[in-house]
Image (cartoon, helix red, strand yellow):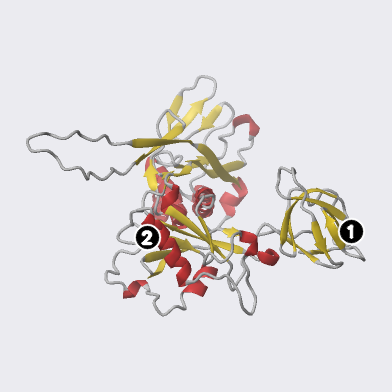
């Protein structure tokens, strides 16, 4: 039965008039009587009186909305497609992920009639602590009574999408912190040197970038997933790669029946899943009214870490740049102190060594957390099997929560407010760093922070 059919039949069979307009969030008690999931409870005695026919959310409808929430979250979970998945443990906040070390070669011949020594399986346990996340929306009795649409259903759909994007981002940030980084075709050594938007010399994603990543994974004996390595790629970056003549679309596969959600094609033994949630390293504007600043020194600056600039007109606040990275020419410095018209630069966030700069007046100061001249940098994750682990949505991973009209007791004396929300228990860990490569490149396009 479809969602619409389920809603229609339930409305028709169990509710009439105002009840039908209010949908499934109804109130049947007040004062000391609290409407819960299973029935009406007396908050002085704790006794629960089960709902009668047509009252509250039935077990079937609770299951329906919980499944509906998960169904709407799953399409956004592209960064979980290739994870080693574990259920949330009962009675504990720690999840144990296991990884097995390869067995060494046995090159010594065995002696006739003598049983050789056995080998021990070496298993490493990676433990991670689960954290909770969640969100909810408040629904008023007037909205529930007057809305044409099924408000609970629409709220659940939007919350499911929010939950999916949130949980996917949590996993993405863990993966984006991996230690194996490849800057384009290895032509540069740092993110801030990646060029983009130029007539030539751009560091866009190419087939050679993919070949280099594949070579690394093969050298680490990373196992493939269904016969291929996999990659998560942003649409801005796939645009640059798909022009290659060797690109194969899913309908060109030898076996096109088994493709991943969001899969767009394959090249050099890597299958690509496209998502707008793929990591973008974006550098925010340096001031409220401008992305860049200009050095303000008529004779320029020479071998100093105190850099004057004209920031008052640009809306730079005192100490507003502290903690930022900036680019001046080919030098990148950490802002350890700043006023409305000067900044003090260091080589890193420890502020143990000054970053001395020599430059002319009106030299452009760019934000330095991304590519050259502040260009957006995109991460394309290429990985093998068992590179990382995460927790599942089912069995406590993601929960749908409905608090009905009047359930707040004395804090909602007129039964005016209901809420619907989600709560998730989540943790993601990188298990084998050598089975994952992050290729950082610029793109023809810039989408900004995601």
Q: Nearer the viewer, residue 268 or 90?
A: 268
Q: Nearer the viewer, residue 183 or 324?
A: 183
Q: Is residue 70 above or below residue 258?
A: above
Q: Nearer the viewer, residue 271 or 134?
A: 271
Residue 371, horizontal then vertical, whole percent: 64, 63
> Which quadrant of the rendered structure holds the C terminus?
bottom right
Q: Residues within 10 Å of mark 1 (few under 14, many from 20)?
A: few
Q: Secondary structure at mark 1?
A: loop
The residue sitting at 73% across, 54% down in the picture is 333
Note whether residue 151 is visible. Answer: no
Q: Residues within 10 Å of mark 2 (few under 14, many from 20)?
A: many
Q: Is residue 190 above or below residue 61?
A: below
Residue bearing mark 1: 312
* Distance from Cα at disc 2 to Cα at disc 1: 51 Å
The residue sitting at 88% across, 64% down in the picture is 300
79 to the left or right of 373: left
Q: Which mark is residue 262?
A: none
Residue bearing mark 2: 229
| Nearer the camera: disc 2 or disc 1 | 2
Q: Secondary structure at mark 2?
A: strand
The residue sitting at 46% across, 53% down in the picture is 73
30 to the left or right of 259: right
- The answer to which quarter of the image holds residue 147 is bottom right
């Amino acid at each position: 039965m479809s969602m619409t059919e389920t809603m229609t039949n339930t409305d028709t069979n169990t509710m009439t008039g105002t009840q039908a307009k209010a949908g499934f969030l109804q109130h049947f008690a007040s004062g000391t009587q609290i409407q819960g999931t299973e029935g009406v409870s007396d908050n002085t005695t704790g006794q629960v009186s089960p709902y009668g026919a047509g009252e509250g959310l039935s077990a079937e409808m609770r299951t329906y909305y919980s499944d509906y929430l998960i169904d709407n979250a799953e399409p956004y979970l592209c960064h979980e497609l290739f994870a080693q998945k574990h259920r949330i443990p009962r009675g504990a906040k720690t999840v144990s992920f296991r990884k097995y070390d390869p067995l060494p070669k046995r090159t010594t011949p065995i002696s006739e009639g003598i049983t050789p020594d056995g080998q021990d399986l070496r298993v490493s346990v990676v433990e991670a602590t689960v954290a909770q996340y969640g969100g909810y929306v408040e629904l008023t009795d007037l909205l529930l009574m007057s809305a044409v649409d099924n408000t609970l259903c629409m709220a659940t759909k939007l919350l499911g999408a929010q939950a999916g994007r949130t949980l996917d981002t949590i996993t993405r940030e863990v993966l984006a912190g991996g230690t194996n980084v490849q800057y384009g075709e290895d032509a540069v050594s740092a993110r801030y040197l990646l060029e983009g938007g130029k007539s030539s010399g751009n560091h866009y994603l190419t087939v050679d970038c993919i070949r280099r990543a594949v070579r690394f994974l093969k050298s680490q004996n990373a196992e493939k997933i269904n016969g291929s390595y996999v990659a998560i790629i942003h649409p801005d970056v796939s645009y640059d790669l798909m022009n290659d003549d060797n690109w194969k679309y899913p309908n060109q596969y030898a076996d096109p029946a088994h493709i991943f959600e969001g899969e767009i094609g394959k090249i050099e033994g890597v299958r690509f899943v496209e998502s707008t949630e793929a990591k973008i390293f974006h550098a925010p504007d340096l001031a409220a009214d401008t992305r860049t600043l200009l050095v303000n020194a008529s004779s320029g600056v020479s071998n100093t870490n105190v850099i004057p600039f004209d920031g008052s007109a640009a809306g730079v606040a005192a100490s507003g740049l502290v903690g930022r990275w900036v680019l001046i020419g080919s030098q990148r410095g950490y802002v350890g102190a700043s006023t409305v018209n000067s900044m003090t630069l260091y080589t890193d966030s420890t502020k143990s060594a000054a970053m001395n700069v020599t430059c002319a007046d009106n030299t452009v100061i760019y934000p330095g957390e991304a590519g050259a001249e502040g260009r957006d940098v995109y991460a394309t994750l290429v990985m093998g099997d068992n590179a990382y682990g995460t927790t599942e949505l089912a069995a406590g991973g993601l929960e749908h929560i409905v608090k009905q009209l009047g359930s707040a007791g004395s804090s909602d004396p007129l039964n005016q407010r209901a809420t619907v929300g989600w709560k998730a228990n989540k943790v993601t860990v990188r298990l084998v760093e050598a089975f994952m490569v992050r290729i950082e490149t610029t793109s023809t396009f810039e989408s900004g922070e995601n």
